[in-house]
Image (tube, rainbow, N blue to C red):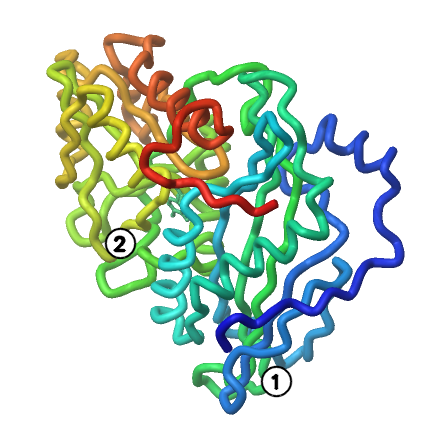
Amino acid sequence: MPNASFEVLPSNQPMADEIRENILKNPGFGRYFTDHMAHIRWTGDAEWHGHQVRPYGPLTLDPAASVLHYGQEIFEGIKAYRHADGSIWTFRPEKNAERFRRSARRLALPELSDEDFIGSLKALLAQDHQWVPTPASASDECSLYLRPFMIASEAFLGVRPSQEVDYYVIASPAAAYFKGGIAPVSIWLSSNYKRAAPGGTGFAKCGGNYAASLAAQKEAEAHQCGQVAFLDAAENKWVEELGGMNLFFVFKDGRLVTPRLTDTILEGVTRNSVLTLAKDEGLTPEERPISIDEWREGAASGEITEVFACGTAAVITPVGELVTENERIRLQSDGNNEVAMRIRTKLLDLQYGRSEDKYGWLTQLV
Ligand SMILES: *Cc1c(COP(=O)(O)O)cnc(C)c1O
């Protein structure tokens, strides 16, 4: 349905200005939601239809809806940024739209066009633009986090792709991921669990991958680590990524290495952007397999000077150490992270409109 416009059903109980402004002062992450949500419905016989922006609220779902039983679900994560002139922008939404279709194909869900994906963000923001926080300074990384997702809603317990599907976008104001500055995180290397296997769903952004990572996340927390790193399932040797972030290694000679994409690694939009920005910084990006042994030896010899993780929510986060059952891998150049912080600032300056958008990565929402 090209050029579908969204019917707007305005909320009759929008949040009072004063309460919303209070929330925006300290929104945390993923705790508060805006007044509306976007919705598009799909059925096997009518394709995508019924484009709406309607009041945010609980869904009515049949208890037999297949998403509740077989987990047929995908999602995206993307942010809206307020620029100094008050306008609101998002970052490379066509990359998220493309990935959403890739995820849809893997989970046997219907594909959504760029037009509907980006259109749904614009339609929602047209109503809820007041929920996009205004940064107080260049170090204030507040934004409105947008969460598009698609669920199988047909009431049927047979195992086959659902013939009824719903797509929604909800939005949640977000403060900087790390309060009080960016401290390097400790990462737990999971040896009991794998995130993804060849032929599986690792490259798709689906709820099931996250459900499967939670036991490893609990293990990490028991070892005072904030995140989990996963090795490949076939050889238990190659570094893949974290539960929800891609990994980069900075070498002393200026190489910037990240694991090459396979069907067990999720292609982050941040990862892709870092690879481009790195070249501007005079670094030499390399996408290739990197083993846990190379990490250990590079850290010990000083060959690897920094490790960082990246994703939309936390932007770029330095990794301080890798913790396993029997060792702690720490870099010699402890606490520097100069390259990670330089790329981080470049990326944020672009997203918040403080530097020239020379790659055409920004799309105006409002
Ligand atoms: C979402 C996600 C990322 C990061 O992707 P971005 O597009 O950069 O936010 C990395 N790994 C996994 C497993 C993810 O789900």
Task: Determine whether label 1 and label 2 are within 8 Å by CB.
Answer: no
Between 157 and 33, which is closer to the camera in this rendering?
A: 33
Quadrant of res 185: top left
Count of numbered tags: 2
Front in this rendered view, residue 9 or 79: 9
Give coordinates of residue 332: x percent, y percent: 24, 9
Query: In the image, residue 228 lies at what x, y percent?
Result: 39, 37
- Residue 251 drawn at (x, y percent): 16, 19
Q: Residues within 10 Å of mark 1 (few under 14, many from 20)?
A: some
- The residue under the point 60% across, 29% down is 142
Which quarter holds ligand 1?
A: top left
Q: Amino acid at mark 1?
A: Ala
Q: Position of residue 147 (x, y in %)?
A: 56, 52
User: Of helix, strand and loop, which one carries label 1?
Assistant: loop
Say which element carries label 2. loop
Q: Amino acid at mark 2?
A: Thr
Q: Is residue 327 above or below residue 27?
A: above
The residue wearing badge 1 is 155
CA gap between label 1 and label 2 equals: 31 Å
Few, some or many residues within 10 Å of mark 2 (<14, 14–19, 20+):
many
Q: Which mark is residue 264?
A: 2
Q: Is residue 222 above or below residue 365?
A: above
Residue at position x 71%, y 48% from top? Answer: 128
Above or below — where is 214 with respect to 100?
A: above
Q: Residue at x 70, y 69 (%)?
A: 7
Q: Quadrant of residue 348?
A: top left
**Residue 73's disc number:** none
Please indicate whether residue 94 sits to the left or right of residue 16 in the image. Answer: left
